[in-house]
Amino acid sequence: MPEEKEREMTVREAGKKGGETVKKKYGPEFYSRIGKKGGETVAEERGRAFYSEIGKKGGEAVKAKRGPEFYSEIGRRGGETVKEKHGPEYYSRIGKKGGRAKKQST
């Protein structure tokens, strides 16, 4: 019987295997820690303008792909979720707070 050669692992498979090994060894909190460190480093090196710019580009890409109606829909759903969580009087309360803050700043 001819021996079967093992096929080579794809880069994706190797990455997944490595990630699972690291997760077993260090735990999922490890990824949170290194992600936070990376984010802090980027913030120090590139500043707030970088995040503003990539956010704007990302928003434009989503708008081009899904259309402006997408934002209307997710805004509506978000408003419904807040209303369910806090109740309709929440909007009245935060509206009053916003009005007071605006009067104080002028």
Image (cartoon, rainbow, N blue to C red):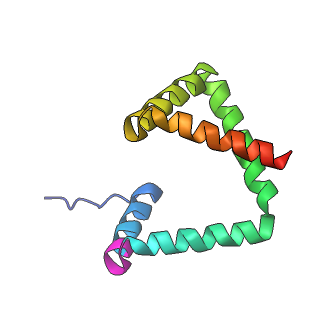
Image quadrant holding the C terminus, namely top right
Left or right: residue 98 versus residue 83 is: right
The mark total stands at 0
16 up-or-down from 77: above or below: below
Residue 18 on the magenta span: no
Residue at (59, 19) in percent of width and height: 69
> Residue 85 location, x and y as percent?
39, 40
> Residue 62 location, x and y as percent?
63, 32
Q: Quadrant of residue 65?
A: top right
Image quadrant holding the N terminus, namely bottom left
Q: Nearer the viewer, residue 89 or 81?
A: 89
Q: Quadrant of residue 47?
A: bottom right
User: Which residues make up the magenta segment?
Assistant: 22-27
Residue at (79, 48) in percent of width and height: 104
Q: Nearer the viewer, residue 93 or 20?
A: 93
Left or right: residue 48 versus residue 76 is: right
Magenta stretch secondary structure, dominant: helix
Residue at (49, 38) in percent of width and height: 90
Residue at (55, 40) in percent of width and height: 93
91 up-or-down from 15: above or below: above
Q: Nearer the viewer, residue 55 or 7?
A: 55
Check the image and name the residue furthest to the left.
Answer: 1
Check the image and name the residue furthest to the bottom.
Answer: 25
65 up-or-down from 14: above or below: above
Check the image and name the residue furthest to the right.
Answer: 106
Q: Nearer the viewer, residue 80 or 100?
A: 100
Residue 23 on the magenta span: yes
> Residue 78 location, x and y as percent?
49, 34
